[in-house]
Amino acid sequence: MNDKAVLDVRGVSGRTPADRTVAVWDLPLRLWHWALAACVLTAWFTPTVHDRLHRIVGYIVIALLAFRLVWGLRGSRYSRFRMTGVRLRAAPSYLWNLRRGITGRYIGLNPAGTLMLVALLLSLAVSAITGALSVTVTFFGVWWIEDTHAWASDAVIVLVVLHFVGVVAMGLLQRENLIRAMITGRKRIRRH
């Protein structure tokens, strides 16, 4: 078997060692990511102005969160939640080392990315569920549901901004276009 065939079997492609990439983010995960981003932005700009659209987008977010939960258990290697606990435990030291520019190299999510994933999923779940509850007969006008929805929604936006800044910063530190990786699904393999 020649080198090209071995590279293709492992999901690695590229003409030279410097160009080699590996398939990381599968299509369902990438579609989920960008659909969720579009829904969050739409939901942020539509409350009280376009309530019907806001509610529809909120229900779509709930469906997307349910899909992510299933895909985190059944999806491809880098979509699964199997390393979440390990990476969450590593997050404090990883963030501490970032001060000195020590990033390590991760094909999937690094510990900071895993921490962001968990924080975003939890705050999105709280925001979407309390939003859905606030339009029911039982919980309509209940102050703590409305306040929780508002706080969780604000937290989501803060986390989205931090996520974007983190992606750009890590891309610069590691000299890799992480936004392109979430579009193409492929990340560059660094030569040793």
Image (tube, helix red, strand yellow):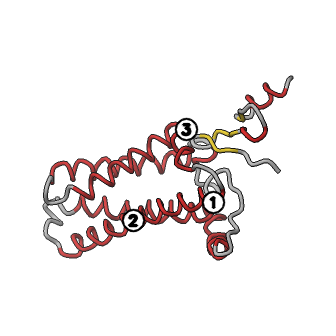
User: Distance between the Cα atoms at labels 3 and 1?
Assistant: 19 Å
User: Distance between the Cα atoms at labels 1 and 2?
Assistant: 20 Å
- Specify the quadrant of the image occupied by residue 172: bottom right
Q: Looking at the rendering, in which quadrant would you find the N terminus?
A: top right
User: Distance between the Cα atoms at labels 2 and 3?
Assistant: 27 Å
Q: Which residue is mark 2?
A: 123
Residue 110, numbered circle:
1
Up-down relation of residue 23 to residue 143 (above or below):
above
> Three-letter amino acid code at disc 3?
Thr
Where residue 80 appears, as percent x and y from the top left, is: 59, 49
Q: Nearer the viewer, residue 104 or 33?
A: 104
Q: How many numbered markers are drawn?
A: 3
Residue 46, numbered circle:
none
Horizontal side, residue 144 vs residue 91: left or right: left
Eye-nearest disc, 3 or 1: 3
Horizontal side, residue 94 vs residue 1: left or right: left
Give the structural element (helix, strand or loop) at label 1.
Answer: loop
Within 10 angstroms of label 2, few (less than 14), some, or many (20 or more) residues?
A: many
Horizontal side, residue 145 vs residue 96: left or right: left
Horizontal side, residue 96 vs residue 158: left or right: right
Residue beneath the point at 75% across and 41% down? 18
Where residue 112 appears, as percent x and y from the top left, is: 58, 65
Q: Which residue is mark 3?
A: 184
Residue beneath the point at 54% across and 65% down? 115
> Three-letter amino acid code at disc 1?
Asn
Q: Nearer the viewer, residue 29 or 65?
A: 29
